[in-house]
Image: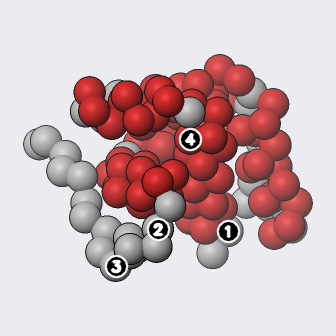
Amino acid sequence: MPKERPIIKNIISDTTLTFEIFQNATLRPVIKMQHDLILALFQSYVQKKKIDIITLENHKAKDKIKSIFEKDINFKHLIFGIIIGHFSSEEFEIYNSNTSEFHKRIIQITVQRIQDTFLK
């Protein structure tokens, strides 16, 4: 069954900056669409590394999730690939114009989604 990019309404206005437009019109919908896969990859990662996120105190678990993305370059690049692979050619050109800024935004959004899901 093919996935469709969700439409996230009311997050772009006339005063929204270019980076925010790309973030809200492209990054957030792709990350939302890939949410289940990202969670499955994260669960697999913590199981393989024998990291028990659930038993940690909330703030320690949040720090651990963030730390995984900071320290494990291969895992972080896998997440980038899952997201960037859904860009159109035009979106890739925008992304490619400032990859470091968009990488930061991808990681922030993804970490927040994982924290919100695992640490309810």
Label 2 vs label 3, nearer the camera: 2
Q: Residue furthest top?
A: 74
Label 3 vs label 1, nearer the camera: 3
Are the two marked residues, 4 and 3, in contact with CB atoms closer than 8 angstroms?
no
In the drawing, what numbered circle is on residue 16? 2
Identified by mark 3, the residue type is Asn
Q: CA distance from mark 1 to mark 4?
A: 25 Å
Q: Is residue 82 visible?
A: no
The image shows residue 73, relative to residue 3, as above or below, that is: above
Are the two marked residues, 4 and 2, in contact with CB atoms closer than 8 angstroms?
no
Q: Which residue is mark 4?
A: 102
Q: Residue at x 42, y 51 (%)?
A: 22
The C terminus, quarter of image = bottom right
Mark 3 Cα within 10 Å, few/some/many (few <14, many 20+)?
Answer: few
Q: CA distance from mark 2 to mark 1?
A: 30 Å
Q: Which badge, 1 or 4, is on the more N-terminal residue?
A: 4
Q: Residue at x 82, y 43 (%)?
A: 67
Q: CA distance from mark 4 to mark 3?
A: 21 Å
Q: Nearer the viewer, residue 20 or 116?
A: 20
Seen in the image, is 16 located left or right of residue 85?
right
Q: CA distance from mark 2 to mark 3?
A: 11 Å
